[in-house]
Amino acid sequence: MTNTSGSLHLKSLSKRYGAFTAVDTIDLHIQKGEFLTLLGPSGSGKTTLLMMMAGFQDITSGDILLDGASIAHTPAEKRNFGMVFQGYALFPHMTVQDNIAYPLSVRHRPKAEIDARVAEMLDLVRLTGFAKRMPKELSGGQQQRVALARALCFAPPVLLLDEPLGALDKKLRIEVQAQLKDIHRTVGTTFIYVTHDQEEALSMSDRIVIMQNGRIEQVGTPSDLYQHPKTTFAASFLGKSNFLHRDGAVFALRPEKIDLDPEGKGKGANKVTGTVQSVTYFGAVLKYQVEVPGLDLIEVDVDAWRGGQALPAGARVDLTWVDSAAVRLSDQSL
Amino acid sequence: MRLPVNSGWLLVLPFLLLVGGLFLGPILNVLWISVTDPTPGVQNYAQLGSSDTLRRILWTTFRVCVICTAFSVILGYSIAYAMVHATGPAQSRMLGLLLVSFWISVLVRTFSWLMLLGRNGVVNSTLDALGIISAPIPFMRNELGVLIGMVHYMVPYAVLPIFAAMQSIDGRVVQASRSLGATGAQTFWRVYLPLTKPGVVAASLVVFIINLGFYVIPAVLGGGKVLMVAEYISVQVLITLQWGTAAMLAAILLFGVLALMFVMSRFMKLSTVFGGART
Amino acid sequence: MHDKNFMRETLLQGAQAFQAGKLQRRSFLALCGMAGFASASVLAGRAEAAAGEIVMWNWGGQSEECHQSAIGAAFTKDTGVPLKFDTSGPLQGKIKEMVDSGNVTADVCDADLFDAVALGKTGHLEALDYSVIDKTKTIDGYALEFGISIILYGYAFMYDTQAYPDGPPTSWADFFDTAKFPGTRSLYKWANGSLEAALMADGVAADQLYPLDIDRALKRITAIKADTIYWGSGSEAHDMIVNGEVSMGMVWQNRGRSIETETNGRYKLVMNQALAMPGAYIVPKGNPGGADVMKFIATAQSVPAQLDLFACLGMTPTNPEAIAQMAEADQPYSITSAANMPNIALNDPTWWGENTDAAVNAFLAAIS
């Protein structure tokens, strides 16, 4: 069951509730086999957009094309998209086996085929041996994997994931992220992933779509977006940034791209001098808050092993960076 | 000093005694009468074997109750479904109408049904005037009339537990089913209905048990020919003074209901049915 | 009905609390379950009685004001003892329960004379004091040890004049002949009256009815079962006729006149072969009002009281003197008037007092 399809094209897609526009003229090409993440704060329209792709939300205007053919008016059950829900939405009255078999059994596939495919799926999500359990007998992470197996069982061209890791604790989340990525590589299905967690987006995605107020703020690969944010919102939502206002323009400067030295020791094309207001130890990095006259508080990350002894609050420091470190944003300076 | 039992029980002890006195007392009295009136022994129960009439009355009661329960629950399910899927204000209005129907006395209902579906009722007169029928359709004063009256009375009782069960369903589970390719019908039969089963079972039990005690509706709408056990008990108590027979039949009803609950408990946790903690 | 009203209100409040989330579903369902049991409950609440007053246990509705004006006013004027009412209906089972429980709250019951036979035998009634009550002021044979007939009602039938324009039915034989007189009938469903009517239809003479041949009667009754519906209360019998559900219906004779008036004569009462039923006053054992109740019963026998009761309730007087004083226009509706007397049957309270259980249960078995 390999997919020859799975490319999606969203054309001027909009969703309005009366005067409120939840999704505002979205244009997007999603490649077959891509892992695309919709990233944004709550209310940014990312979940609404996903639900429109799934067929659970009517579209107000625009079109959705799957491999070139419109599916805008195809009912959800005919789209053949897999979907993993927030909270998993497993069928509580069915065993793991029956949950995973569900998409095949509603398609009236022969029992032998179903059993073989369910076994294959259990193996894929590493839950072999759990077939007879009920969902409530599983941990959150296991339930999440059952939901994934169920959604992939019928080899959908596109898998939609709505904050699937939201209910897991941080440690488990990182583990499941890696598994999810593995599974994506194995099955080759197009994954469209909704999250508000930037780390999740950075670590898993081929491309990230940053959304705000129903619009696309910026699209790109994780490193592209991180290195070259185009707006203040993109620069602050994905990673941290200091914002410098120069010559009527705004520049984003990542905290780890600033060198921090005791006053008088700093060497670089761009240099400012300030006073350390606080320093916090994070193991791998030291996070400094530096007060520079005429600028906001500047945040600087210093590799802890390289920085030696932390400078105390009140110390006078030079901050330096190379030209390419400051990225000019499209926003107007205030 | 430590009390041998949780002291919380002491708080409810007066109420337990009250319930014991007011509820268990009369039940025990009924059981006692059933084996002592008119003479000690089990002759009242032996009547079940010897009397065709008693068996027929019990069978009529059972048959009418089962049919009425089935229709009440199916109608109640449809109404609850519409209510769950109605928007806020519409849902409140529907719920209001449902609760208002609890106010309508059973006598008013039976009278209204006779006006509507009686021999010269609105429906028969209209059909006759339109030339659709030549003789009135006998809706009332028979078993059909009893069923119509009872189902109408019981539907609100069926709606509430089913409505509660439907409200507790996570809408994403239904979306999940559709996203996995199930049609509306498949989603209903394989996901929605199983998840509302506790509500359906609760509704069926409540409706069935209340049905067993129906008196006025069968007596009036049945035209005297649909004799159910509650009316028969009443006659034995009030008119023929066969209190032993009456108590025996009451005991049979009681044990019948307990047996029913026992059988149900073999298939599912009754605590789930009645909204207890889900473990 | 009090219990039911209470349960309904409790349930309603429960349903509201349940919706508001104040009552757990389990508790609400338990409440519903209790309502199911409670609706089978048959005992209604009743008024408290005390010495120094007489409580009459009757059937409510009009009978309360009629008994007060016809008997109570004169009785209170003579004795200074007030008359109060419990209107929950003194069925045999309720009287027995009241006396057995030791909490007797009524002094006199507006019952049937056969109740006096049945309950007198089992010790649930006080013997009447015939030094106060006059045996001669009632029909022969209707002054018994434990009860005396004060008024008469009866079973007769009415027919739809439009259904039988060419030759109206005139006897029970016609009533039970669905070939000659097609159409739906109604009968009383607790056997009383229905059995006698069937026997008269089968040719038994009015003065040869007792002891009733139950099997013979039921044969006639089941023969027309498909065309018969059965009523359990006077208002039901009334509705069946005026709503056109039946073309011939058995009624309590005293209600016939008002149905004739109400339907502008479309439905007509047939008094031929009517069965006169002795309505009786009986006194529960240990009644709280004591011996005053005998004076009350004596007052009810007086001519003015008897005539007032007829005017108010349509019940025929039993005092021969009162019957003689009735107006000409009232005579046809008075079951024991000189004109009706040769054509009617008289109920035998002794037979019914001893055979009610067998007769009623056999009847129910046959019609259900």
Image: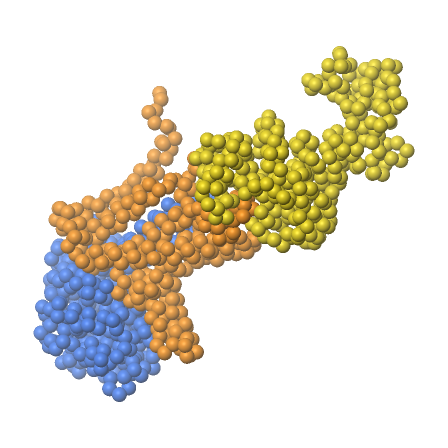
Closest to the observer, A163 or A125: A125
- Percent coordinates x, y for residue A181 in the rendering: 62, 32
Visible residue check, residue A63: yes
Q: What residue is shown at x 25% (from left), y 71% (from top)? A: C226
Colour assignment, chain B: orange
- Percent coordinates x, y for residue C164 in the rendering: 27, 84
Residue situated furthest right in the rendering = A247
The image quarter in which residue B132 lies: bottom left
Instruction: Examine the rendered structure and indicate whether residue A123 appears above or below residue B136.
Output: above
Instruction: Examine the rendered structure and indicate whether residue A188 appears above or below residue A269.
Output: below
Q: What residue is shown at x 13% (from left), y 62% (from top)? A: C355
The image quarter in which residue C365 lies: bottom left
Q: Is residue A330 left or right of residue A165?
A: right
Q: Is residue A204 left or right of residue C311?
A: right
Q: What residue is shown at x 48% (from left), y 50% (from top)? A: B186
Supply the letter of whichever chain is blue.
Answer: C
Closest to the observer, A193 or C133: A193
Closest to the observer, A8 or C45: A8
Instruction: Indicate the colouring scheme.
Output: by chain
The quadrant of the rendering that contains the C terminus of chain A is: top right
Residue situated furthest top in the rendering = A309
The quadrant of the rendering that contains the N terminus of chain A is: top right
- Percent coordinates x, y for residue B279 in the rendering: 43, 35
Supply the letter of whichever chain is yellow.
Answer: A
Q: What residue is shown at x 36% (from left), y 62% (from top)? A: B149
Visible residue check, residue A43: no
The mark tally for this picture is 0
- Percent coordinates x, y for residue B7 in the rendering: 37, 28
The image quarter in which residue C254 lies: bottom left
Q: Is residue C57 left or right of residue B10?
A: left
